[in-house]
Amino acid sequence: MIVKIREYELPHADSGPYGITLGKDGALWFTQHKTNQIGRMTVGGKVKHFNVPTINAGALSITSTTQGDIWFAENKANKIGKLTITGEIMEYVLPNPDSAPFGITEGHNGDIWFTEMNGNRIGRILPSGEIIEHDLPRPGSYPSFIVAGSDNALWFTLNQSNQIGRITLEGDVTTYNLPTEKAGPVGITNGPDGALWFVEINGNKIGRITISGVISEYPIPIPNARPHAIVTGPDDALWFTEWGSNQIGRITVNGKITEYPIPTKKAEPHGIVVGSDKALWFAEECNKLGRLSFGQKS
């Protein structure tokens, strides 16, 4: 496989790009927590910015909906933000203070689901704007990323309790313990095989859990890779960021791992998504967006 990585410097110095998603408009939308903005970049590299109304909101994870709206978690402001297709930003204040919302995704029925790291809850915003919260069974479990699974439920990582969680639309929670102790699961995505794939930032592994709860783990070849986010690629493999080793990793559904170095040293890659151009786009804390394209050898 021939892989090429190109990086795009962002116009505002030290903006802190973190989460990234593909918008319905075909552009890349990303959070910039240090400049308190939501960015938009076309696949051609044209950038536009939107200011978050709340000062120092801590916008981190971000997702795009089938309706075309952009939703993001304001980790420091205790709010969920919504950027409409008309460019208006709305903010929803969470019922409990200092909940530290983090992961966010669209559910199967169009509701917005999110995690509350400090609140130890899974939250949900209905189309009406009503917020529903579900307490997690173990205190201090630190729910992180969340994604809609293939089984009409939501799946999420529990970073501190070392588990993968599942919540139904009715709010019933099931948790699954990871085989590796203190693995620190973070990113999670719906895989091409119908299973959920996740990264273990401390365990230095890629994990897989079936919808029936069977877990497999695959060690990352390089030590201290610190994998962060993961996404299913257009090639039906899983792609993930390694901010510890400064690489982008790829794992097949059979567990074969390949890694590709990022040109900029200490880039600190975080969020990753498939763009409308079928390339892998990722946010680099070093104030860049990266684009990884690939093809077969001739």
Image: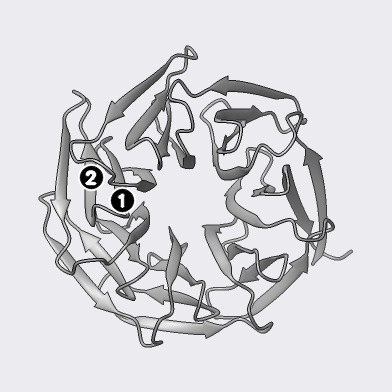
- Give above or below for 66 relative to 210: above
State the residue in front, 240 or 32: 32
Answer with left or right where residue 171 lies relative to residue 218.
left
Which residue is outermost to the right? 298
Q: Residue at x 29, y 44 (%)?
A: 98
Which class describes the residues within 10 Å of circle 2: few (<14), some (14-19), or many (20+)?
many
SS assignment at label 1 = strand
Pointer 1 or 2: first along the chain: 1
Q: Position of residue 297 (x, y in %)?
A: 85, 66
- Give above or below for 113 relative to 47: below
Which class describes the residues within 10 Å of circle 1: few (<14), some (14-19), or many (20+)?
many
Q: Residue at x 15, y 40 (%)?
A: 132
Q: Which residue is mark 2?
A: 123
Q: Which residue is mark 1?
A: 115
- Residue type at tag 2: Gly
Answer with left or right where residue 3 lies relative to residue 105.
right
